[in-house]
Amino acid sequence: MCTLKSLTVCIATLAAAPAFAQAPQLGQPIAPADIAPWDISIGPDGVGLPPGRGTAAQGEAIYVAKCQSCHGEKGTGKPNDPLVGGMGSLAPDKVPMKTVGSFWPYATTLFDYVRRAMPFQESQSLTSDELYAVSAYILHLNGIVAANDVLDAQSLPKVRMPNRDGFIPFPRNPK
Amino acid sequence: MKRNGKSGTPPGEPVAGNGILSRRVFLESALATGAATAGASAASAQPLAIEPWMKIPGTGFEGYGQPSKFESKVVRLVPPLPNPATQGVGTARTPLHLLDGIITPSGLHFERSHSGVPNIDPDRHRVVIHGLVKRPLVFTLEALSRYPMESRIAFIECGGNSAPLNAPKPAPLGMAAIHGLLGCQEWTGVKLSTLLDEAGVEPSARWVIAEGADSAAMSRSIPLAKAMGDALVCLYQNGERVRPSNGYPVRLLLPGFEGNMNVKWLRRLKLTAAPAMTKDETSKYTILLKDEKSWQFVFPMEVKSVITRPAPGIVLKGPGFFEISGLAWSGNGRIKQVDVSADGGKSWAPAALTGPNLPMAPVRFRAAWQWNGAPAVLQSRATDDTGMVQPTRAQFAAERGLRGVYHYNAIASWAIDAKGEASNVYA
């Protein structure tokens, strides 16, 4: 409560209120080049893809050495997720088998996920050439690219995935 | 379906089929004795003993308190891993049937991790905001700790919670295995909008790609409106620093949204014009419908409830009075009503909503039940303040089929057999 005596204190408090409501501005500016080691995002348009290239023929050896123990021979799965197969299994009344080939809408997602999270025991360890090659191999096992098709920053986003048009927006999201 | 919850019914009187009593038992703390409570044993109790813990002093003090050793079975359910080599891919599930109230103990909050729990040094952790912003910024934990904070009680539910109920036949699973990917905490942190305002969001930005510092660098695209709305960058969970399995030292809270979007171990926020189409928003957390199409970007966890007691593993020792208790929640707002049924949905009566009832938080509901000892099927049905009613399993399946895996929110059923044992059924 403000009495006449404490009026100056009250005015001082009111004047200070807007300053208190201000955020403290403690973020440090950082140059984009210094963020680059962390900026591993890749869009479906291919923005963010690194230089490099690879083919399925080159990727097979990498797959056998780094991926097969979890994802099975030629991507057939077990003990972990299958990467290949399930084409046509999204049809009504069928039991869906959702793999890179049957379900994933963008090839860029495959490259992005392998780069950020695989191989499981040593994330972010593959070179860009190895990433393009092993992505090409998984797409080739699914019949999506040929054995000697070169994948790079230009060609990977152009790969047409079978389920590219399979997604629709949820009708009840908040506005 | 009949609705019999007449407000003029005396406490303890049946108001729906198979022994559901008036909720006024809870609202007025008044329970009529006599017919409704008949069945309780009238045999005299044993003489009272002086126990040893009253004769000698107890133990001393400890730095961090622990539950009683007699509660050692109250732990999360950790299902076996498909591959021991990929440890840390999977879940630890909350034993909701052994808890009460709405707050999950921090150590029992469910965990869904995609590449294990990282061991993050908070002094070396950074949160960066970049992309379509005027000033890319990096924040230390020490800096984040100096911002004005706010607290809210909110649920986080994994998109895959209750997924076993999509199966064609009811699996012999219990509470934690079916519904244990739900937790509720008091979360405390800095409004994400404060940090985004400091960086200066460009007008062309529509999405924020949030990324964790785990070895899967788990990432999700979040609509800018949510990021600028009630999103919270959380440092505290139930009053202490966020637990490692829940995102230490900093995680995102998107109240009401799919659990996976509440990115743990938050390290990076990139403002973009379009979503990134990450693995966890394309190949996972999308809902395959009856036809070949899938819903993508399914944000709110819609209205839902589960009966947490009785439940499998809790045996009713003979006929008599029991409380039916559970949780109801909605990612779209506050719970308005919960109805319960003891006859598999033929008749319903409103349960009492007890304790706090907050938006995007579970409310505890309670109903009084006079079990006659015969087989019964218990169900609960929640309605939120947007008017959405939890669907029956048939209604749920009619809309989207049962191939969607994620966001299962249909009415669940526990059958009680003549021995008083509960089991998962479809009814």
Image (cartoon, coloured by chain):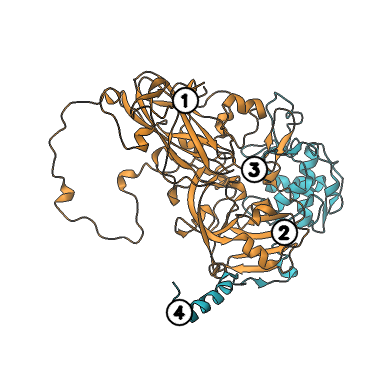
Chain colours: A cyan, B orange
* Disc 2 + disc 3, Cβ < 8 Å: no
What separation in Å lies between label 1 and label 3 (alpha carbons)? 53 Å
Residue that badge 2 annotates? B271
User: What subunit carries mark 3?
Assistant: A
* Disc 1 + disc 3, Cβ < 8 Å: no
Three-letter amino acid code at disc 3?
Ser
Q: How crowded is mark 1: few (under 14 residues within 10 Å), some or many (20 or more)?
A: many
B280 or A72: nearer the eye? B280
Q: In which quarter of the image is residue A40?
A: bottom right
- Circles 1 and 3 on the same chain: no
Select label 1 or label 4 by which is in front.
Answer: 4
From this view, report whether residue A172 is shown above or below residue A94.
below
Secondary structure under tag 3 reads: helix
Q: Could you tell me how many numbered marks the image carries?
A: 4
Q: How crowded is mark 3: few (under 14 residues within 10 Å), some or many (20 or more)?
A: some
- Circles 4 and 3 on the same chain: yes
* Residue at image coords 34%, 50%: B67
User: What subunit carries mark 4?
Assistant: A
For residue B348, the mark is 1
- Circles 1 and 2 on the same chain: yes
